[in-house]
Image: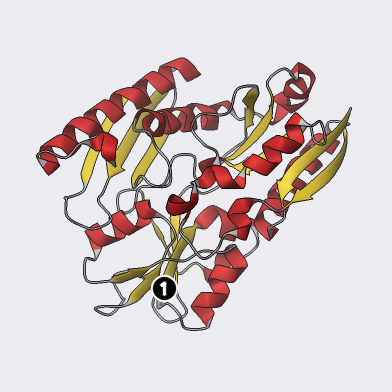
Amino acid sequence: MKLTIATRESRLALWQAEHVKALLEQQGHAVTLLGMTTKGDQILDRSLSKVGGKGLFVKELEVALEEGRADLAVHSLKDVPMELPEGFALACVMEREDPRDAFVSPKHASLAALPHGAVVGTSSLRRVALLRALRPDLKIEPLRGNLDTRLRKLDEGQYDAIVLAAAGLKRLGLAARIRAVFEPAEILPAAGQGALGIEIRSERKDVAEALAPLVHQGTWLRVAAERAVSRAMGGSCSMPLAAYATLDGGYLAIKAAWGDPDGRVALVRADAAAASADLAAAEELGTAVAARLKEGMVRAGGALDPDQH
């Protein structure tokens, strides 16, 4: 079968698309790449939460699918909106790479080693809220651009440290830049972090069948629960929300956290666990955790309405 993959043109996105291409070629398919620049790649002077969210990274790829110029699009799952437009489907979730956040610094070995008032760069409101909970003395500054751009800004001395997804650094052979990883108990990952998702037009059953051997069911169960938390919370990049699930046998456990990036409200956490044999059960568990999180947010903030954040 001839297949065309729509992909962003950043180095990491191209690695991801090439990875999927190689796996599909092993299945006997003929695969080409269609490289595209998205609005998310073009708008670098403002935070994503102010210009339309992470959906900016997928819209142009969806247009290519709709117009028939591509058959599938490969995404970092944490960039995929919780609700896909009508006519599109998430057809495959692949085995997860390291889901944790990484501490990167040329001078300092860990977050704890940073001096008082040090400048830390991140583009994620989730990381801002969780870093503030750990080190309220730090100065946290916005950091946009692709992985290489972020590392260059760090090396130029614009930041004392930056926080990135460990998965991206490892995929690009940059694991040596990681000074420390944050365990989920310290900084809870974003929903879907470290996992690749493949989007198709929902009527393309032929493409879904071609992708079936690439599906990792355990990862899909975990990220389905995580994304259900975000969906129930109205999750987008304007929401400082973390959700992370683990799977042991058929037993799924999920933790979630919401934090105020301005530090006015204490970090709110919620968790739940249950036997989850399918995606519907995983999503139900995630929705239940979101309800607990909303209750905790109201308690923490008094009159705070979680739907307004």
Screen quadrant of the C terminus: top left
Rendered location of residue 53, percent (x, y)? 48, 46
Label 1: which residue? Answer: 161
- Residue at the spot 31% in from the left edge and 37% down from the top edge: 255
- Residue at the spot 26% in from the left edge and 61% down from the top edge: 132
Residue that extends furthest to the front in the rendered view of this protein: 51
Q: Amino acid at mark 1?
A: Ala
Q: How is the image coloured?
A: secondary structure
121 displayed left or right of 264: right
- Please tell me whether residue 194 is drawn above or below residue 105 in the rendered image: above
Residue 85 position by quadrant: top right
Between 18 and 32, which is closer to the camera in this rendering?
32
Q: SS at mark 1?
A: strand
Screen quadrant of the N terminus: top right
Rendered location of residue 59, percent (x, y)? 63, 40
Rendered location of residue 86, percent (x, y)? 60, 22
Rendered location of residue 297, percent (x, y)? 19, 38
204 displayed left or right of 283: right
- Residue at the spot 28% in from the left edge and 44% down from the top edge: 258
- Please tell me whether residue 305 is drawn above or below residue 160 in the rendered image: above
292 displayed left or right of 46: left
Between 185 and 38, which is closer to the camera in this rendering?
38
Neighbours of disc 1 within 10 Å: few (<14), some (14-19), many (20+): many
Residue 65 position by quadrant: top right
